[in-house]
Image (cartoon, grey):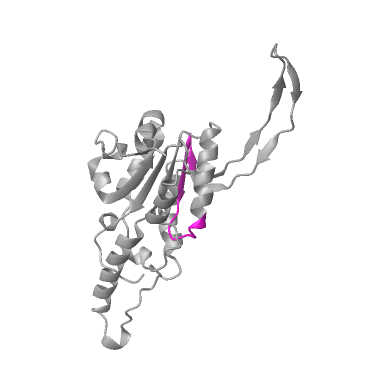
Amino acid sequence: MFETRTYDDPIVLDPKIRKRWAFLETSSAAAVLRSVCPAEWADITAVLEAFALDPAHWLKKGGNRGDIAKVIDGLFAARGWRETRVDLVTQGVLLSRNLEVMERLPPVEQEGYLVDNFKGRVALDVEWNAKDGNLDRDLSAYRAWHEAGVISAAVLITQDRIKLKELAERLWAEHQATLPADQRNAKLPIDLNTSTTTNLEKAALRVRRGVMGTCPLLIVAATPETWNGQPYSAV
């Protein structure tokens, strides 16, 4: 696994975007995207620049994963990205020494899954508080698609759970202080204590085991700097 930091290059990624998100990449993914898939990279950076974490949607009981993911997916959909299922078909061909076809073996079909956003030669998933087993599915699919020549790189958007938990607790406490004493509830409306959901830490553990092979992967995680600066308010 080749862990790189091309996202630190201001030519590759605007420092203003770099400051607002945490990144981890393999095989120079950001530089590959910028060079090989410039239109898709422009979309990705535009979405990262536009998105801000809104506590009203983030700290919402029962809607945490759905609301955040829907907002980000909507930003990509507006730029022509589509939810897409990617299947692979492999067929062996037996050739003679003279390169004459002797036999074509039965094709082997590999059923894929619906990737959240696909455009050009880039696959992009938004994994926000889903079960962390989703990461195994995502990363293995990206590697298979890259080795088959279907994609040039993959992107995974998630969250820095530990840092965002600290921010959530502060915002929630500030909100509770504005309520009458008999209406206060110290417990967060969403569960940020579990570590078995998709987040930067879980993705990094898998990537650093070398599961990506040579597939360029860019992991982008929301941090407190991604927050829009507004206090929590119920919607």
Report the quarter where the C terminus lies. Answer: bottom left
* Residue drawn 60% across the image and 44% down it: 112
Residue situated in front as seen by the camera: 172 or 203: 203
Asked whether the viewer can see residue 175, the reply is yes
* Residue drawn 23% across the image and 42% down it: 15
Residue 105 part of the magenta-drawn span:
no
Q: Quadrant of residue 196?
A: bottom left
Q: Position of residue 80 (x, y in %)?
A: 46, 40
Q: Position of residue 125 (x, y in %)?
A: 46, 48
Outermost residue toward the right in this view: 102
Outermost residue toward the top in this view: 98
Report the quarter where the N terminus lies. Answer: top left
Q: Quadrant of residue 144?
A: top right
Asked whether the viewer can see residue 150, the reply is no
Residue situated in front as seen by the camera: 165 or 85: 165
Location of residue 211 with respect to 189 vertically, above or below: above
Q: Position of residue 105 (x, y in %)?
A: 74, 29
Locate residue 156 relative to residue 164 in the image: left or right: right
Q: How many numbered marks are there?
A: 0
Give the magenta part as a residue range. Answer: 118-133
Q: Position of residue 26 (x, y in %)?
A: 39, 39
* Residue drawn 27% across the image and 78% down it: 176
Q: Quadrant of residue 200?
A: bottom left
Location of residue 64 with respect to 180 vertically, above or below: above
Residue 132 part of the magenta-drawn span:
yes
